[in-house]
Amino acid sequence: MGEAFATAKEAADDESVIAFGRFLGAASRLEHVLGREIEERCGISHLMFEVLLILARAGGPGLSMRTISHEQVLTTGGVTRLIDRMEAAGLVERSDNPADRRGRIVRLTAVGEAKAVEASGVHRANIQQYFLEPLPAEHRAAFAEDLRILSRTAGEAVGRLR
Amino acid sequence: MGEAFATAKEAADDESVIAFGRFLGAASRLEHVLGREIEERCGISHLMFEVLLILARAGGPGLSMRTISHEQVLTTGGVTRLIDRMEAAGLVERSDNPADRRGRIVRLTAVGEAKAVEASGVHRANIQQYFLEPLPAEHRAAFAEDLRILSRTAGEAVGRLR
DNA sequence: GAACAGTATCTGACGCATCAGATATTCCCG
DNA sequence: CGGGAATATCTGATGCGTCAGATACTGTTC
C-alpha cells in the first residue's frame, strides 16, 4: 500500500488518488450536466426525475416513502420534502396505506407518467448524442462492458464502506 | 436512436437509461461514501479536501479564487464561502494579489498542508481497501484501464454538453 | 485620459438536503 | 393483554451551494 506521504505535494501527486479523483470528478460532473439538461428542458429537478423513474419502474399501486428513500440516497426527511414538491407540481399523489396506518403510498399521476416519458426521452437522447455516438463504433461494445464493470465494482465498494 | 417511449414503464425500462443510471448512481454514491469517510476521520468536508489537493498540486505562491472555482465545479460565490470556512479553520490564507488588485491569492498554511497529507493517506487507504484490493489480481490492470477510459469519455461528454 | 466593457470577488435571498427530535402506529415478548 | 422497542413519516434548525446583483479594479478604444 506504499509509505505515508511526506509532503502535501507528494500526496497530491499520488497516482491512485489522482486517477480515482479524475474518475469520480468526471462522473459527478457528467451527472451534474445531465441533471441540468433535464431541469432546463423538462422543468423538473434531477432528483424528481429519479423518483419518477423509480415509481414507473415499480409499477403497481405505488411505493412507500421509505422505499423511495432507500432506492435514492436521501434521508426520509429529504424524501418527505421532495415528495411535497412533486405533489405540489402534480407529478405524484400520496394516499394512506390501509395496511399500515403509519405509512403513506406514493404513486404517479397521469401528469407524472407523461413527464417520466418526456424526461426519459430527453435523457436518452443526451446520453446518445453526447456520450455514446462520439465513441468509435468498434469501441462501443467494449465500452458498455467497462461501464457495467465499473458500476458493479463501485456498488460493491459502497456496500463495504457504508 | 430508437422510437419515442409510449409509456412511463417502457421509458423506465429502457436499457441505455438504466445502464447509465446505474453507472452514475454507483459513481455518485461511491463519491458520497468516500467523502463521508474523509469528513468523519479528518474533520474536513469533501470539498475542502478537493481544494487542499488542488492547492497542493499547484504549489507555488497559491491560486486565485477564480482558478479554484474553475478546477472545482463551484460558482465563484460558492468558492468565496468555502474559502471563508477553510480560512476560519486555519487551513488556508488569503492575501491581496499585488499584480491585480481585484484578486486575492489563496495558499495553504502549514496546518492545511498537514491536513492534505493526512486526508490523502486516509483517502488512498480507503480506495485501496474497499475498491482495489477486492478485485481479482488478474483484473486490476484491465480495470485501471476501464477507469481511465471512462474518465476521459465522461470528461469529453461534459465538455460537449456544457 | 475618459468612458465603458470585462473580470474578480463578495453578499443577500433563496432552495434544498441533513440532522435530531416529535408523533403516530405496529410488532413482539413476557 | 400490557408495555417497550421498532418503524414510518413529518418538522424545526441548520449548513452549504446557487443565483443575481453590488463593488472594485483593469484594459481597451477613441
Image (cartoon, coloured by chain):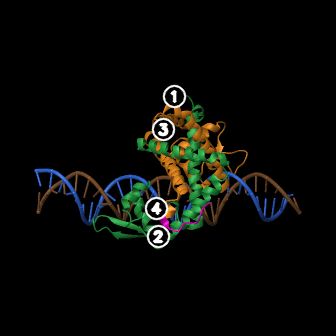
Chain colours: A orange, B green, C brown, D blue
Q: CA distance from mark 4 to mark 1?
A: 43 Å
Q: Amino acid at mark 2?
A: Leu
Neighbour tally class for label 1: few under 14, some 14-19, many 20 plus, Cα within 10 Å? some
Q: Main secondary structure of the magenta part?
A: loop
Q: Amino acid at mark 3?
A: Phe
Answer yes or no: are tags 2 and 1 on the same subunit: yes
Residue D12 percent across, percent down from the top left: 55, 64
Marks 3 and 1: which is nearer the front? Answer: 3
Residue marked by disc 4? B51
Q: Quadrant of the N terminus of chain A?
A: bottom right
User: Is A10 situated above or below B12?
Assistant: below
Q: Position of residue B43 (x, y in %)?
A: 55, 67
Q: Amino acid at mark 4?
A: Val
Q: Which residue is mark 3?
A: A131
- Marks counted in the figure total 4
Q: Of residues A87 and C16, which is closer to you in this image?
A: C16
Residue assigned mark 2: B91
Horizontal relation, residue C13 to residue B102: left or right: right
Real-space Cα distance between discs 2 and 1?
Answer: 52 Å
Q: Are tags 4 and 1 found on a single chain?
A: yes
CA separation in Å, label 3 and label 1: 19 Å
Q: Which span is picked out in magenta? A: A1-9
Element type at mark 4: helix
Q: Earlier in the sequence, mark 4 or mark 1?
A: 1
Subunit under mark 2:
B
Residue B80, above or below C25: below
Amino acid type shown at disc 1: Ala
**Does the magenta segment cover residue B58?**
no
Residue behind mark 1: B4
